[in-house]
Structure formats: structure tokens, C-alpha cells
Image (cartoon, rainbow, N blue to C red):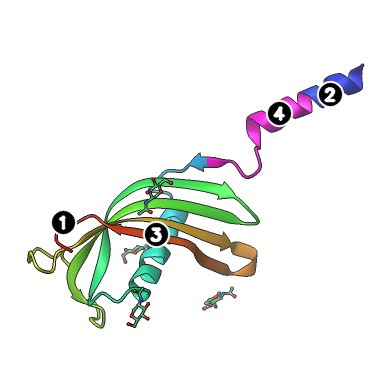
């Protein structure tokens, strides 16, 4: 009888506090989110053929998931800037010239394994949201 009660309590506890692999919202100001965001945007800029750097204009959603380390799921709005990719330490304003201004919405997933010193962008989906393509 007690075994059953304890098993039941353990199950309730597990469901309430530690669903493995569940996705939860995370504060966008959290340092780990900012790191994941910086990493994503750097990878994004390295892996497209645009002339100008893109930067984040809005973090729409930030979530995390425990999966052999931590997954960060980010949905962000990006915009093209006035900085070319080879520019160093320039102040990068949002591009306003109509023929160069572009906006995007991206889904990024960053996989971070702290003990392996391993960080990877495992999902990188972007849609251009500006009208003139
Ligand atoms: C993210 O990048 C911004 C701008 O490059 C920098 O100011 C900030 O300190 C970085 N944040 C983290 C957590 O690395
Ligand atoms: C960038 O351009 C190269 C050569 O034209 C092409 O092979 C590659 O797929 C392009 N990359 C992206 C992310 O569009
Ligand atoms: C983690 O990896 C980065 C880049 O690969 C490297 O610069 C850094 O020294 C490594 N840190 C540790 C603690 O191994
Ligand atoms: C991002 O993910 C959401 C939810 O899965 C999806 O509706 C949206 O189309 C995705 N956006 C892009 C740019 O792939």
C-alpha cells in the first residue's frame, strides 16, 4: 500500500516539477538567452550571402528545453543595417534606404552543452518579411 502511495507521489512530483524534454518559456533578459541570441545572429551573418550585416530588432519568443544540455528556441525579427560584413566596430544603424532595407523573421535553435564546450545552431529558418525583395 505505501509503495503504491509513494509511487503515486513520485509520479505527481515528476509531472509537476521535472518533465524531461518539455519546452518552457524563459525570460528574454536571461544571460543565457542573450548569449544564444548573439551566437545565432553571428552564425546567421556568417551563413548568408547578404552584403550588409543583419541585426536583431525584436526578440519575439524565447524558450528552453533540456535535451542532453540545453536547447534555446528563439523567434526574432532582424533587419539589414548600414554595416557591410567586413566593417569593424562601426555603429550599425538599421538600413533606411528603400532599395537596401530588408527585414526578416527567423527561428533559431541553439544547442548548448556547457560541459562539452559545445554550442551549435541546430535550426536556422528565416523568411524575408520586407515587401521589396
Ligand atoms: C551580446 O552582444 C551585444 C552586442 O554585440 C553585447 O553588448 C552583449 O554584451 C552580448 N551579450 C552576451 C551575453 O554575450
Ligand atoms: C551563397 O552563394 C553561394 C554561391 O553562389 C551558394 O552556393 C550558397 O548556397 C549561397 N548561400 C546561401 C545561404 O544562400
Ligand atoms: C571553448 O571553445 C572556444 C572556441 O572553440 C575556445 O576559445 C575556448 O578556449 C574553449 N573553452 C574551454 C574552457 O575549453
Ligand atoms: C517559425 O516557427 C513557427 C512555429 O513553428 C512557424 O509558424 C513559422 O512559420 C516559423 N518561421 C519561419 C521563418 O520559419
First in sequence, mark 3 or 2: give its number: 2
**Rendering quarter of residue 116:** bottom right
User: Circle 4: is it few (<14), some (14-19), or many (20+) Cα within 10 Å?
Assistant: few
Q: How far across and how far down the image is residue 107, in percent?
A: 40, 54
User: Please, what secondary structure does the residue beneath circle 3 have?
Assistant: strand
Residue under label 3, please give it. Answer: 125
Q: Is residue 114 above or below residue 49?
A: above
Q: Earlier in the sequence, mark 4 or mark 1?
A: 4
Q: Is residue 79 above or below residue 117?
A: above
Q: In this figure, which residue is indicated by the disc labeled 4?
A: 13
Residue marked by disc 1: 131
Label 1 neighbour load within 10 Å: few <14, some 14-19, many 20+ = few
Cα–Cα span, label 1 and label 2: 60 Å
Give the residue at x 44% y 59%: 36
Residue in view at x 15 percent, y 65 percent: 93
Quadrant location, the C terminus: bottom left
Is residue 15 a member of the stretch shown in magenta? yes
Ligand 4 lies under 8 Å from the Cβ of mark 3: yes
Q: Secondary structure at mark 4?
A: helix
Which label is found at residue 6? 2
Q: Secondary structure at mark 2?
A: helix
Mark 1–mark 3 contact, CB under 8 Å? no
* Magenta residue span: 9-23
Amino acid at each position: 500500500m505505501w509503495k503504491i502511495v509513494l509511487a503515486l507521489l513520485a509520479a505527481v512530483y515528476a509531472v509537476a516539477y521535472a518533465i524531461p524534454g518539455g519546452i518552457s518559456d524563459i525570460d528574454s533578459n536571461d544571460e543565457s538567452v542573450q548569449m544564444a541570441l548573439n551566437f545565432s545572429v553571428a552564425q546567421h551573418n556568417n551563413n548568408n550571402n547578404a552584403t550588409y550585416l543583419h541585426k536583431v530588432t525584436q526578440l519575439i519568443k524565447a524558450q528552453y528545453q533540456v535535451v542532453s544540455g540545453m536547447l534555446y528556441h528563439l523567434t526574432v525579427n532582424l533587419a539589414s543595417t548600414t554595416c557591410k560584413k567586413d566593417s569593424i566596430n562601426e555603429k550599425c544603424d538599421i538600413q533606411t534606404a528603400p532599395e537596401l532595407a530588408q527585414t526578416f523573421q527567423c527561428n533559431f535553435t541553439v544547442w548548448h552543452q556547457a560541459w562539452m564546450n559545445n554550442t551549435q545552431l541546430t535550426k536556422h529558418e528565416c523568411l524575408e518579411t520586407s515587401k521589396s525583395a
